[in-house]
Amino acid sequence: MTFDEDRSQIASGSAPQVMASLRNAVIAILRLNDRDNLAEATGQHARDLNRPINTLLQS
């Protein structure tokens, strides 16, 4: 529920599978960086535009 999947309007073609894969990749990257609270981590990443890039570079 962290990514609000229930309200997603993506429902055609392969888009739902792609979005699920992207969400799983984000979760894996956050957990690799010792982030267990996904809601807190995504909130922090949303507020600071440099943080997602730095997290990707650290992975």
Image (tube, rainbow, N blue to C red):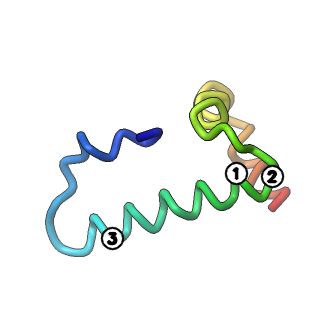
> Which residue does the image show at 61% across and 40% down from the upper left?
38
Residue 48: percent from left, percent from top:
68, 29
How packed mark 3 is, by other alpha carbons closer than 10 Å (few <14, some 14-19, many 20 or more), is few
Residue matched to label 3 = 17
Residue at label 2? 33
User: In the rendered image, which quarter is residue 49 located in?
Assistant: top right
Residue 30: mark in rendering: 1
Residue drawn at the location 59% of the way across and 28% of the way down: 43
Q: Kindly indicate the quadrant of the structure image that contains residue 51.
A: top right
Taking depth in this image into account, of 34 and 58 the one nearest to the observer is: 34
Q: Compared to 17, does 28 lie above or below?
A: above
Earlier residue among tags 2 and 3: 3
Residue type highlighted by circle 1: Leu
Residue 31, horizontal then vertical, whole percent = 72, 54
27 vs 34, left or right, is: left
If you read the primary sequence from the N terminus, does the residue marked by circle 3 or circle 1 appear first?
3
Amino acid type for the residue under numbered disc 3: Gln
Q: Secondary structure at mark 1?
A: helix
| Spot occupied by residue 36 in the image (x, y as percentages of width and height) | 71, 44
CA–CA distance in space, label 3 to label 1: 20 Å
- Up-down: is 1 above or below 48? below
User: What kind of element bears circle 3?
Assistant: helix
